[in-house]
Image: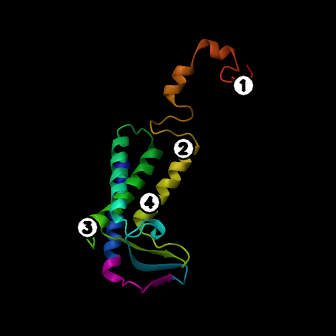
């Protein structure tokens, strides 16, 4: 599941960026829905909201670290929700990393192609950015509701084994040292 989602995001990002670069000109937005949704070709050397412009090499290193982390974590993944989440993050990181590796001005310094503009007050973004944001939101939701990478929910299985003793079942205040 993780791999399927990541490949889908990567392919969708690459195709849309190729179409945008071929058909749009910088500074000439196409108004799809008045001033609410526009297609506008921008090249971004920074991160979201153009933070860190000129520090492309740092964002390249961060993307590589994220990709390595997700690939290493995937070995222990047993949750569909986390597989989708990690797939979104992996595909998004790889999509923007591809720009940083293969686009001008050069290897490891390339500008990311952004093209989706929602009103003039929201930063311009791309499919990879959307996947990363959705993956981040899902990460927060899964963690908040207690879903673990290994497919368990609530208290982690490893900690429940160590706290399961016959004495703890008889004493309701075992973990509460404030009353002692």
How many marks can you see?
Answer: 4
Secondary structure, mark 4, is: helix
Tag 4 near tag 1, CB within 8 Å: no
Q: How is the image coloured?
A: rainbow
Residue at image point 36% right, 46% down: 69
Front position among marks 1 and 3: 1
Tag 3 near tag 2, CB within 8 Å: no
Tag 1 near tag 3, CB within 8 Å: no
Packing grade of label 4 (10 A; few <14, some 14-19, many >=20) is: many
Tag 4 near tag 2, CB within 8 Å: no
Tag 4 near tag 3, CB within 8 Å: no
**Quick one: label 4 or label 2, which is nearer the N terminus?**
4
The correct choice, above or below, for 103 with respect to 142 in the image is below
**Quick one: label 2 or label 1, which is nearer the N terminus?**
2
Q: CA distance from mark 4 to mark 2?
A: 18 Å
Residue at image point 53% right, 73% down: 122
What residue did someone put label 1 on?
A: 178
Looking at this rendering, what residue extends furthest in the bottom direction?
28
- Please check the rendered image and state whether residue 23 is part of the magenta-colored stretch, yes or no: yes
**Quick one: label 4 or label 3, which is nearer the N terminus?**
3
Packing grade of label 2 (10 A; few <14, some 14-19, many >=20) is: some
The correct choice, above or below, for 171 with respect to 90 in the image is above
**Quick one: label 4 or label 1, which is nearer the N terminus?**
4
Q: Is residue 141 visible?
A: yes
What residue did someone put label 4 on?
A: 131
- Please check the rendered image and state whether residue 75 is part of the magenta-colored stretch, yes or no: no
Name the spot of residue 158 as percent of width and height, x first: 49, 26
What residue did someone put label 2 on?
A: 143
> What segment carries the magenta color?
20-32
Q: CA distance from mark 4 to mark 3?
A: 20 Å
Tag 2 near tag 1, CB within 8 Å: no
Q: CA distance from mark 1 to mark 3?
A: 59 Å
């Amino acid at each position: 599941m993780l791999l399927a989602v990541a490949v889908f995001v990567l392919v969708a990002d690459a195709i849309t960026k190729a179409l945008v670069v071929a058909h749009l000109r910088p500074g000439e937005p196409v108004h799809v829905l008045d001033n609410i949704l526009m297609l506008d070709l921008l090249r971004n050397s920074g991160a979201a909201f153009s933070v860190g412009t000129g520090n492309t090499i740092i964002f390249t290193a961060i993307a590589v670290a994220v990709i390595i982390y997700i690939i290493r974590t995937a070995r222990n993944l047993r949750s569909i929700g986390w597989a989708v989440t990690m797939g979104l993050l992996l595909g998004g990181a790889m999509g923007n990393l591809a720009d940083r590796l293969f686009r001008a001005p050069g290897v490891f310094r390339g500008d990311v192609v952004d093209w989706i503009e929602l009103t003039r007050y929201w930063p311009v973004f791309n499919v990879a950015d959307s996947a990363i944001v959705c993956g981040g939101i899902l990460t927060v939701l899964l963690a908040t509701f207690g879903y673990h990478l290994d497919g368990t929910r609530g208290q982690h299985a490893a900690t429940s084994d160590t706290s399961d003793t016959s004495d703890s079942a008889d004493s309701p205040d075992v973990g509460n040292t404030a009353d002692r």
